[in-house]
Image (cartoon, rainbow, N blue to C red):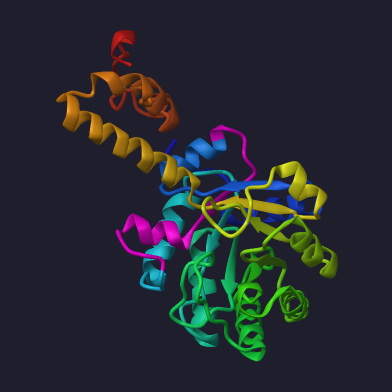
Amino acid sequence: MLYSTTTPAAKRAAFRERLRSGELLQLPGAFNPLAARLIQDKGFDGVYVSGAVVAADLGLPDVGLTTLTEVAGRAGQIARMTDLPTLVDADTGFGEAMNVARTVQTLEDAGVAGLHVEDQVNPKRCGHLDGKQVVDEPTALQRVRAAVAARRDENLLVMARTDVRAVAGLPVAVDRAKALVDAGADAIFPEAMRDLAEFEAVASAVDVPVLANMTEFGKSELFTTAQLADAGVALVIYPVSLLRLAMGAAERGLDALRAEGSLTGQVEQMQTRARLYELVDYAGYSAFDTGVFDFTLDDNHG
């Protein structure tokens, strides 16, 4: 009922412990708090908050238009609704070193278990688009050092994302990953790897967890969890998948409504009222206050 009873500190500690287990952790992207509830209900290991999804939800492209306030607000709404750890995309930290430090503390206050800061220039763009630019290595390392210095909970996971593979090739990406770890990064997110061998090259070069981004329509093939685990990957995110699934279904439904004048033919594809009430825990509210939930559902009305 209401929000998660697991504290942010407990989620962070649990996230660290799971990462030490050596298991591959799956973190689907949640585009809203209800999706985070569903991710938890289905038994996944964590929840991811994508900057691209936050932008798209606002009707914006992923080109650095969202603000720290918008990202922290949505991340906090999602994190408080699940017992799972929430990992959030902090873009470039929304500025340089001092901005990065403020970003870390703001997201820490929002209750997330971890965040990643990348080495693109400001304004950034989607990691799977062409024409990206990255900052020089000293600037990238400065961002990570600022992030690590700013956190107040030592269990807050500070992950460094590098986009340099698309700009300067794999060897440079491996060298930068190692430098980011030396600067204090707790984990590495090598963006837009081309194949499993590239993930393996990064994972074997560093002694911290490595994340794989399995985004559809991107630079990487959609590898299975078994393939990624064999390549040494520790975490995998599916950042935009649920949004794409939901928007695809919504578009098909609207097309049907325009063509047929009714959604009768779409009802079987919809989440039932009973299932929605289960996810938002009407029963829990009933136990707390019978005046909130004092009716029963008619099976014929979902």
Q: Is residue 96 visible?
A: yes
**Residue 138 percent coordinates (x, y):** 66, 90
Residue 165 located left or right of residue 54: right
Q: Is residue 3 visible?
A: no
Determine which quarter of the picture holds residue 174.
Answer: bottom right
Residue lying at 71% horizontally and 75% vertically, measured from the top left: 173
Residue 130 located left or right of residue 167: left
The verdict on residue 57 being magenta is yes
Magenta segment boundaries in residue numbering:
41-62
Residue lying at 54% horizontally and 43% vertically, measured from the top left: 5
**Residue 204 percent coordinates (x, y):** 85, 64
Determine which quarter of the picture holds residue 118.
Answer: bottom right
Which part of the image, by quadrant, shows the C terminus? top left
- 117 or 278: nearer the eye? 117
Residue lying at 54% horizontally and 57% vertically, measured from the top left: 218
- 241 or 12: nearer the eye? 241
Compared with residue 271, is residue 120 higher up or lower down, i.e. above or below?
A: below
